[in-house]
Structures are given as C-alpha cells and as structure tokens.
Image (cartoon, rainbow, N blue to C red):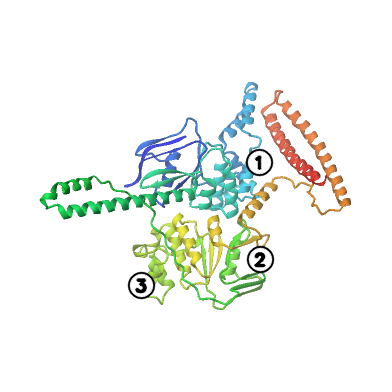
Amino acid sequence: MIDINDITVRIGSKVLLDHASAHIADGWKVGLVGPNGCGKSTLFRVLQGGLETESGNIAFPARYKVVYVEQEISDIDSPILDFILNKDEERRQLLEKLDKASPLELGEIHERLNAVSAASAPARAAAILNGLGFSNEDLTRAVREFSGGWRMRLALAAALFQPSDVLLLDEPTNHLDLEAGMWLQSHLEKYAGTLVLISHDRAILNDLCNYIIHFDSQKLVTYSGNYDTFRKTRALQQELLSKQAAKLEHKRRHLQSFVDRFRYKASKAKQAQSRIKMLEKLESVTLLEDSAAAHFDFPQPEPLSPPLISLEDVSTGYGEKLVLKNLNLRIVDNDRIALLGANGNGKSTFAKLLSGRLAPMSGRLKASAKLEIGYFAQHQSEELPLDMTACEYMATLMPEALEPKVRAHLARFGLEKEKALTQIAKLSGGEKARLLFAAMTKSAPGLLILDEPTNHLDMEAREALITALNEYQGSVILITHDLHLIELIADTLWLVKNNTCREYDGDLEDYRRELLDEKKTARRPEPKAKPTDTGLSGKEKMLQKKALQSDIRRLEHRMDRLQEERQRLQEAFMRELTPAEIIAAQKDLAYTENQLADLENEWLEASAALEKLN
C-alpha cells in the first residue's frame, strides 16, 4: 500500500497539490491524469524521494523498492547488455562476493543467486532490449554509441529489468515506435508489482490501468476502472451536479422573488424574513473543473482528380544506400493510411519521398499537378526561429496576407490572442506543435503526412486532433505510436518492412499478435515439426506421421541427455567449488535449462501435430 497523506506540494509560488490524499493498494495499475502543468511529474519526484512535501507525507511499506526511469545516461564504454545487468544491484553484489567468499559463505550466496534467478538474468535482459527495438548485434555495442532517443529506450529497459515493488513510468511510449509500444504494453500487463503511469496514450490507459487518479482542483480523486470508465463516471457526476445546481438555482429564484415582492409589506414581513434566512442557508453546488477545450481546424482542400500520388517501381534511399525498393502504390482522395513497421524500416523515408523531401532513385513517382502536401515531423520544432513570435513566423510563410488573416489562421489551431504574440522560445511543446500544424496547412493541402503528431499533445488536444482530422476532407498518412489515433482515423494499414511498403491484410490486433509472436520465435529455434492440414492424401499422411515420430524420438533422446546433464550440474553444487567454478557451473546450468525448454516446446508441437494426423 502507498499512502499519500494530506500532502501539499508547491513549486515556487504555485501550489500544485493542496492537502491531497490517495491510497494505492499493492498490485494496482494506476494511471495519473490531468491537464499539463497540474503536477503529475512533480508527484513522481515526491514518490522518488527527489522533492519534499510542504506538509503531509507519503508512506511506503518497509523495504519497498521504488524504480523509475533515469532521465540521463552518461557516455560509458560498457556494452548495453552489461549496463542493464548491473542495474540489478543484489545480483551484481552477490557475484562480486563469490570471488572473496569463504567455503561456508558459498552455499548461502549460491542459494540467494538461485532465489533471484541470477542464471537467467542475461536472457531476461536481452528479451527486454529486443522488445524495445534493440537487435542482438546491439547487445555488445557500447552505451556511448547510441543516440539520445535510443538511450531513453535503454533507460526504460533498465527500469523494467530491475526487481521492483513499485514502478513509476512517465510517458514511457514517447520515444518508442508503435511496435515497441505494443511490446511494452504486453510486458507491463504481466508486471506483478504496483505500476503508476503518466501517459496521454488513451489506448494504454484503457488496456493497462485498473484505477485512475485524477488531479482535480489541487486534489487527488481516485476512480475505479480504466480511462474510458473514468471519463464516463466523471461525465455522470458532472450531469448530476448540473441538475442539482439547476434545482438550487430554481429554488433560489423562487425565494428571491417572494422576498422582492413582500419585503416591505407589513403583513408579509415575517414570511419575507424567513425566506431571507432560507436563502442564506442555501448551499451552492460546485461543478467539476474540466480542462479548457482544445481546438484544431484544418482548412478544407479543393477536390482533385485521382490518383493524388502514384508510384511505379519506385526505389529510394540516401546516397548509395537503398532503403525502399519496388514501390507500386496509389494514394487517392480521402485515403486514411497508417504506416506500420519498426523504427529503421523506412517509414520516415517513405514519408519524405511522398512529401518531395527525398527524390526517387529509380522508377516513376507522379503527383497531381495541383496537389499541395502538408508535412509534420516532430524534429521540425527544433528548426523554428525561437526569437520570433508565432505571428511573426507565420507572417513570413504568408507574405501576402494581412495580420488579421495570419492571426485568424493561428487561431484555427488554438494560438489565439497573447499566444500568437508570444515568443516561440517561450511556447510549450504542445504549443509549438500547434504552430507546426498552422505552418503546414497555410495553403489548404490536399494530403497531410503526419509523423508522430501527438508526442507533445495532452489528452484533450489529442481528442481535438482526432475530431479535426475526421472533419478534414483531404487524405491523411499517419506515422504514430498512438493506437487510439490509428483506430479512429485510419481505414487502411500499410506495412513498411523488408525494404518495401505494402498494404497489410489485417487489423491492429492481428498486427500486435504477429509482432509478439515474431519476438518470441526470435529467441528460440523454429520447430521442425509442422502441423499438417486436413487435405493430405493417405500416403502423404503416413510419410508425415513417420517424419513426426522420428522427430519425437530424436527430441526425447536429446531431452534425456540434457536432463542427465542438468542433474550432473545440480549435484556439482553439493561439492566444494571455487568461486570461479561456481560461476562456470551456473552458466552451464542456465544454458542447459534453456536448451531443455526449447526442446520441450518442439516436442509439444510435434506431438500435437501427430495427434491431428491420428
């Protein structure tokens, strides 16, 4: 149980939490929600012990381990696999003790190493790194070789690997692609500890969380259920409060009318005074505070004859490096396409090709003569002129427009009044994203290419973006890790993989299953025994049965040998061994157990296939 007891938290002169309380039971998966700036990340700092409360306290059970994602990882020469393994401090300290341990201590250390599953740690760490997008070749590369975005993934992997009672994750999918995000969600579903999550990703808050804590007027209010349940419950509360407020207002007006009419009439003075006292005792109803409504409004394009873009045997890349080849695709009016594919497969390269930022190496790309393309990419915010105001910057992009028209266009994306006159350097990440939306749509493009458009948008802004895109009458191509955005916008999925792009025959759930299956099979050999279909002839069935029976006998023979080897290695620990011999025996035992598990999987699949033939 985590007890947040009557805490007050202040940053500078701003009070974020005022005598707020909440209770989180063991094993809960909790989503923290509220508008940007309400104090979600600040509460995380308090939970981590990095910020003191002004009053109140947060109580954890004794020996609870709270784990969170490091914000910075320094340049080090250690391979990333070793970096992750060293984050399990108990395992690392136990292995260090082996070198100096006495014979009496060895048994105790070995017992503890078994308890913390030390032998399987490298496999577990590798699985986490693979799930977050690191290849097997990456595991031996030094930390210093990876860029900032990949180091954020590395920091996330370190947090997931460490033993923990409480795991704090602040926007964990922001630096992930869709595929790594799907894996992360699947991994967190199996997490046995208490998870506290800050996210603007509606799909994760719905699929993962069973409780929501809402930052409401400097208080913490707990709701049972996922994010959608929270929204429905809150809407019902607001409706009931509105009805209650309307009834009170009707009663107030009725009483006030009597007082105004009879206050100075002697025969009614006593009744009027009674009504005045009743008015004074009437309690007011405070409606729930909701975030200010977000707003997006994409200008509508002129209709164009199809296709907007056609690609015939197009190949493209950078310099001599070929990234995509043999592209044969068409984009027509009102297409809504989401691009799938892991980071590095070429999604952004494809987007640059369509937007004209990258030329074809071969083949033919033909675009409609009047087609205007709006292109949004997250990195563009780094190229904004920080010393200019939003209005000044837009005026450079719309040189023929008068200031009222420029400001009206900014207002379509929520940059109104003082925000339009604010220096870009002082705008938040979400406000800079709005400015980029305004810039890309200045000429009412017929095709919007959006590369991770929601990274800096809060929940309300994301919902407003979805509404605006659904009202927009042009075509949209999406690259995003936001499943909710894809589900509500895209009607076609294209998969960028193996140096090409093709339409994906399935939905997002099919893709998720396929992706997770691929990650599982990547860590174990492909079974040789295959289930047969029911259309085989009698002779073919007999041949397949013989092949499967032979495979099963071979697998059973190998399993017997490995079980004998495992028994021998386990018995070796009963003898007095040097620390080096213990470490070597542990490695051998872990390798043997992994091989045995793989063979057992193959045996089960072959046996199941044989049963279908009988």
Q: Amino acid at mark 1?
A: Ala
Q: Earlier in the sequence, mark 1 or mark 3?
A: 1
The answer to whether any part of residue 328 appears in the image is yes
Residue 56 percent location from the top left of the image: 36, 36
210 sits left or right of 273 in the view: right
The answer to whether any part of residue 79 appears in the image is no
Q: Residue at x 68, y 50 (%)?
A: 518
Q: Earlier in the sequence, mark 2 or mark 3?
A: 2
Callout 3: SS: helix
Q: Determine the CA span between mark 2 and mark 3.
A: 48 Å
Q: Nearer the viewer, mark 2 or mark 3?
A: 3
Q: Amino acid at mark 2?
A: Glu
**Which residue carries the number 1 mark?**
123
Q: Earlier in the sequence, mark 2 or mark 1?
A: 1
Callout 1: SS: helix
**Which residue carries the number 2 mark?**
320
**Which residue carries the number 3 mark?**
404
